[in-house]
Amino acid sequence: MTGEAIFQWLGTAGFRIWHSDKVFLVDPYLTRNERAKPRQDLRPADMAGADYIFLSHGHFDHLFDIPAIVDASGATVYCSGVASKTLRRLGVPSTKLSVVSGGESLDFGMFKVGVAASRHIRFDARLVLGTLPGILRERRALKLFDRMPAGPVLITAFDLDGLKVVHLGSMGLTPEQAAALRFGVPDILLPPLQGHTDICRRAAAVTAAIHPRAVIPQHHDDFFPPISRTIDLEPFRRMVGELLPECSYYEPEMNQKFTAAEVFRTT
C-alpha cells in the first residue's frame, strides 16, 4: 500500500499504520476479556502483515499480544529493556527485539521514528479506591500486571514523508515536560485518556503544551472491565477547543481506517 499513510485505531493505545509498503504497529493489544466495550474481533493472526512494532511500555494492555503477533508476522519490536526482558520470557526471539531508551532517531527509509523517554501516569487515590473492588474480583488482572511490569515509558514520533505523528502510551508527562520535547510541532498527536480521575484536564493541558495541528484521543475505551471504564471524551474535546481553537479534533471508531486528510477535515 503506497501513497498517503492510512491509520487504524485498534482500541486502547493501539494503532496499525500503513505507509510506503510497510506496516507498523504501536501498542497492539487485541485480546481483551469478554466484557470489553467495544468488542475487538481482530486477533494477532490478523496482524500478520506487520513489519515493525513499537511498544510504549510493558503493561499487559500494551504488550500482551506481541509474542503472538511476532510469531505471525516476523515483525521486529522496538521497546525498553524491561519490556524486552518480558518478551524474551514469553518466547520472543532476541533477534526480533531492539532495545531503545529515548533519544534514538531510527531511519527506515520512507519514514523515520524518534524516541523519547517519558513516564507512566500515577494513579490517583480516588481512581485506585474506585477500581480496587473490581481488581479483587478480576484476579487475572493482578497476575497480568505482576507478569508484565511497565518499565520505562517511551514516546514515539513518526515522520511519514513529512507528516509528523506523535504517540503517547501513558499520560505521565507534565505540560512543562511536554513542551520541552524536541520533536517540533506535530501534525497529529495521539494522547491516552486513562489512569486518572482528572484525565481529561491533564490530557488537554499536555495537548496544549505540545500544540499539534490535530489531536486523536485514544486509550479511552473500557478494555478490561471491571478494572477499566469508558472515558467521557466530551470534557477533553471542549477543553482542547478552548485551549487550541485551531486544533482539529478527530475520534475514530475501533478498527476504522482513516487518513490525515480526513482528520484535518474535522473541527
Image (cartoon, helix red, strand yellow):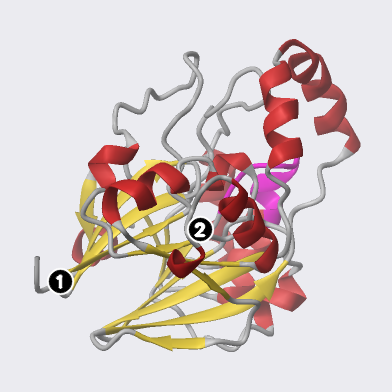
Residue 246 shown left or right of residue 149 in the figure: left
Residue 177 higher or lower than 14, as above or below: below
Furthest residue in direction right, as rendered: 125
Q: Nearer the viewer, residue 247 or 34?
A: 34
Placement of 186 over or under 15, stated as above or below:
below
Q: How many marks?
A: 2
Residue ID for mark 2: 241
Determine the secondary structure under disc 2: helix
Could you say which quadrant of the image residue 214 lies in?
bottom left
Element on which disc 1 rests: loop
Q: Residue at x 32, y 45 (%)?
A: 252
Q: Position of residue 145 (x, y in %)?
A: 72, 37
Amino acid type, mark 2: Gly
- Residue with the mark numbered 1: 4
Residue span colored magenta: 192-202
Q: Is residue 194 magenta?
A: yes
Mark 2 touching mark 1, by CB under 8 A? no
Is there any visible trace of residue 58 in the rendered image? yes
